[in-house]
Amino acid sequence: MTVEQIDSSKVLISLCNEDLTEYSLRFDTMSFNDPHSRRILNKLLTIACGKTGIKQEKDKSMLVEAMPHSNGCLILLTMNHKKKKRTVYRIKKNSSGWCCRFKNAEDFLCSLEKLSEKKETLYRVSAYLFGESYYMFIEQSKLPEKATEILSEFGRLRKRELLFSKRLSEGGKLLFFKPKFTGRLW
C-alpha cells in the first residue's frame, strides 16, 4: 500500500492485489453502504491521515473515489469536499402581458402590416423566432380592441406565461424589440 499526498486536501491511496486480499476487499463489492467496506475505508483513511498529516474532521464532508487498475485499486480521498449548490431560479412577479403565436412568417408579417394600417400603438413589444413559429410578446396589461382583433385573426393570442417567455428568450432568436411599437420596424 502506498499513500501519496497530492495537495493540501487530496490523498491518493494505491492498494495492490495483496492489500485487497489482506483487507478482504473486492473492487466490485466496495461500497460505502457495505459495513465491511466502510470499516476498511475508515481504517485506510486513518492510516492515510497519519502518514500525510492531513486532519480528518468529523463534521466536514469528504469525497471518496475508487478506480480499478491492473495491479489493484486506487482510492482518492478529497477532504472538506464542497458540494455544488443547486441553482434556484425564482419567479418574482406574475406575468402581465400577452403572447401571440404565429404559425408562419406570412401571418406574422400580415399582422404587423394591419397594426401599422390601423395605427395601433403597443408598448414593450418583442418578437422571437422559435422553431417554425413566430412569437410576439406585448408587455401591457390591456390591449386595444382593434389590436386584439388583428392579432387573434392571424395568430393565437393568450396571456403571457413567464416561464415560457424566459425559455423563449434563452432559446429563440430575437427578431426585434420596440419600447413603443406602431407597426413599423424602421
Image (tube, rainbow, N blue to C red):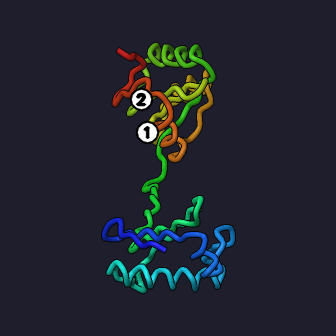
Given residues 45 and 182, the one toward you in this image is 45
Q: Amino acid at mark 1?
A: Gln
Report the side of 32 relative to 54 (left or right): right
Picture coordinates of residue 33, whole percent (x, y): 64, 78
**Sequence-first disc among 2 and 1:** 2
Given residues 48 and 62, the one toward you in this image is 48
Q: Residue at x 58, y 63 (%)?
A: 71
Q: Amino acid at mark 2?
A: Leu
Q: Are marks 2 and 1 in contact (CB under 8 Å)?
A: yes
In this picture, is 11 found above or below 143? below
Q: Residue at x 63, y 74 (%)?
A: 31
CA neighbours of label 1 inside 10 A, class few (<14), some (14 to 19), many (20+)? some
User: Which quadrant holds the C terminus?
Assistant: top left
Tell me which corner region of the image, top left, top right, bottom left or bottom right, holds residue 174.
top left
Picture coordinates of residue 117, whole percent (x, y): 46, 13
Q: Residue at x 45, y 74 (%)?
A: 62
Tell me which corner region of the image, top left, top right, bottom left or bottom right, holds residue 124.
top left
Q: Residue at x 42, y 86 (%)?
A: 58
Total labels: the figure holds 2
Picture coordinates of residue 183, whole percent (x, y): 42, 19
Report the side of 91 relative to 67 (left or right): left
Circle 1 — which element? loop
User: Which residue occupies the extreme front position in the image?
Assistant: 18
Per the rendering, the mark at residue 6 is none
User: Which residue occupies the extreme right position in the image?
Assistant: 29
Picture coordinates of residue 86, whole percent (x, y): 47, 61
Circle 2 — which element? strand
Identify the residue position indicated by label 1 in the image. Answer: 140
Per the rendering, the mark at residue 122 is 2
CA neighbours of label 2 inside 10 A, class few (<14), some (14 to 19), many (20+)? many
In this picture, is 27 found above or below 115? below
Report the side of 47 relative to 102 (left or right): left
